[in-house]
Amino acid sequence: MSNLEVAPQETDCTSTPANGTLLIEARTVPLGGVRGITVNRTLPSRQVPTIGAWCFVDHFGPAPADSMVVLPHPHTALQTVTWPLTGSIHHRDSVGSDVIVRPGELNLMTAGHGVSHSEISLVGPDPLRGLQLWLALPDDALNAAPAFEQHTGLPIVETGTLTATVLTGEFAGARSPATTYTPVVGAQLSLRPGTSTIELEPGFEYGLMVLDGPVRVDGRALPDGDLLYLGPGHQGVELSTTTGSRMIMLGGEPFEAELIMWWNFIGRSHQDILRARQEWEDHSVRFGTVAGHGSERIPAPPMPITILKPRRRNKPVRRTDGEDDR
Ligand code: MN
């Protein structure tokens, strides 16, 4: 999807999560467009700009099946992960991909130096609902060639009372085939009634989101749609449900590079963003063309009058004890 905010703002991130955990409350963001779809956004947040390389988490729908109409728009320096829960989306991009994105299938587009794509949801029996996630690319992948992957046979692993579909990285001994550029994990967890403790990588930070509740995390109810941040140092977490539920788990090694996120671009400097914006407006070959749309595309919004600065935060508080103290 696209960040269609009319006046995208920089996100200033200076707070430090306390005790190694923080509840990031979802905020509703209108995306504009013909039918005015809104999304619930948890990343970036004021307190937590990234979780590992995960830098953007939008939860959209349920909305009418055909309510997503996102015309060609550009991306730089990131990967998009589209994960429909219900409904389906027609994806076309400047690499030449022309696919239907369906629930249970991972769709991963790597922008590298530059890519453009469109996403139009299809009429169907189910409402449209899903997740749009971005992974920031590290410095050594900024000039990677644009690419698109669709994985229809993701690994599914059973552990305790849950079944995990591994989107990216490795979870419970199962590894996703998806191409990533930093140590990350992404998984959808389906919980049966009961309690399980899942192992966490202490060098990673994590975010947990309930899709369909109820879920208690280390004994505390986690509201649907919010994102519970767990800083590095956690060995494991206890997940319990009385009626069955679904969650998303995202994690990764804390991302060290300083990022500027503006509109659909990620850069390392104001100049990077300015150049990308101008090249999109100039129809540069950098972003290629998306077949099937003629001259239709999303114009870049005007640049803010201020100089964009890297998004910073203090180091997350590392959990060092074994107490359930969040
Ligand atoms: Mn997009």
Image: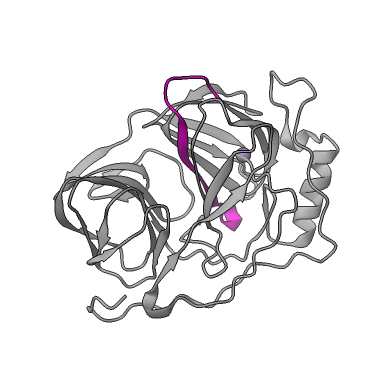
Residue 140 lies within the magenta run: yes
Residue 224, image x and y in percent? Answer: 37, 53
Task: State the residue in front, 147 or 40.
Answer: 40
Counting the numbered discs, the total is 0
Query: Regarding ligand 1, which quadrant of the image does it lie in?
Result: top right
**One can see residue 235 in this view:** yes
Residue 150 lies within the magenta run: no
Task: State the residue in front, 213 or 163.
Answer: 213
What residue is shown at x 45% (from left), y 41% (from top)? Answer: 179
Would you say 301 lies left or right of 112 here?
A: right
Quadrant containing the C terminus is bottom left
What residue is shown at x 42% (from left), y 59% (from top)? Answer: 227
> In the image, which residues are magenta?
121-141
Q: Looking at the picture, does residue 244 appear above or below residue 45?
A: above
Q: Looking at the picture, does residue 38 appear above or below residue 45?
A: above
Residue 135, image x and y in percent? Answer: 52, 50
Residue 254, image x and y in percent? Answer: 46, 66
Residue 9 image-quadrant placement: bottom right
Would you say 30 lies left or right of 199 here?
A: right
Task: State the residue in front, 85 or 113.
Answer: 85
What residue is shown at x 26% (from left), y 46% (from top)? Answer: 245
**One can see residue 145 in this view:** no
Residue 117 image-quadrant placement: top right
